[in-house]
Image (cartoon, grey):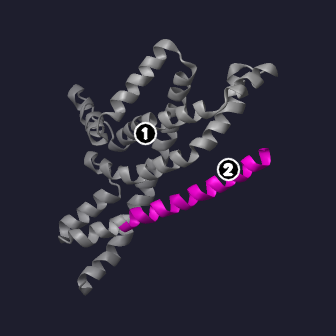
Amino acid sequence: MSGDVVQLLIESFPRILLPGLIMTIPLTLIAFAFALVIAVVVALIQYAHVPVLRQIARFYIWVIRGTPLLVQLMVGYYGPSTFGFHPNGFVVAIIVFAINEGAYCAETIRGSLESVPVGQMEAGYCVGMSYMQIMWHVVLPQAFRTAFPALSNSLIGMVKDTSLASNITVTEMFLATRQIAGRTYQFLPLYLEVAFIYLLFSTVMTWLQRLGEKKLGTYTAKRA
C-alpha cells in the first residue's frame, strides 16, 4: 500500500466516522425504538388471538418480510413524490426501518410470549390481576428476557442495513465513503475502511449485548 493511500485513509477516517456517529447510530437507535413499539403491539395482537386484527397483523408481517428492504425504502421515498410531496430522507429511513424491523421483531416477541407457561396467566388471575396487569408485570418481562439475544442481533443487523439509506440521499457512513471514493478513485481501500468502522460499531454492540445478557441472567437468578 502506497504512502498516498495510507495518508488518504488517515484523512478520510474521521470524515467517515463522523456521519456514523451523527447519522448512522441515531438512525439505528431511533428506528429500532419505534420498531420495538410496533413489534410489541403486533405480537400482543397475535398472542391475544384478536380475530380481525390478527389477520391484519399477519398480512403486515407477510408483506414486509416478503419484500426487499431496499424496495421498501424506494417506495417510501419516491412514492410520495407522485402526489407532489417530497419527504425528508432521514425521516423516511426511520419510518421504513421501523416498519421493516418491527415485522421481524414481532415474530421474535410472539415466540417469546408463547414460551411463557400458561400457568403464569392463571396465577395472575388467581391473585386478582387484570389481563393487562398480568401482561405488563408478569408475561412481558419474561418474554423480553427470552427475546433479548435475538432482538440484540436484530439491532446489530440494522446498523449494517442503514447503509441502504444512502440510496435515498441520507448522508450516513456508506454515502460519505462513496463520495470520497468518487473523488479519489481509491474504491477498495476506502470500502475496506468503512467496513472496518461498521465492524467496530458491531463489536461494541456485541459487547453490550453480552453485558445485557449477563445482567439479565443475574437478575433471573435473583428472582429464582
Question: Could you say where residue 217 lies in the image, as x and y percent from the top left?
Answer: 69, 51
Question: Could you say where residue 158 lies in the image, as x and y percent from the top left?
Answer: 42, 49
| Lower sequence index among marks 2 and 1 | 1
Magenta highlight on residue 160:
no
Q: Is residue 128 visible?
A: no
The residue that mark 2 highlights is 216
Q: Which residues are magenta?
A: 196-224
> Residue at left 54%, top 18%?
49
Which quadrant of the figure contains the C terminus?
A: top right
In three-dimensional space, the C-alpha distance between marks 2 and 1, rounded to whole angstroms, equals 23 Å
Which residue type carries mark 2? Leu
Which residue type carries mark 1? Glu
Question: Could you say where residue 170 lies in the image, as x and y percent from the top left?
Answer: 32, 49
Q: Nearer the viewer, mark 2 or mark 1?
A: 2
The residue that mark 1 highlights is 101
Label 1 residue SS: helix
146 left or right, relative to 56:
right
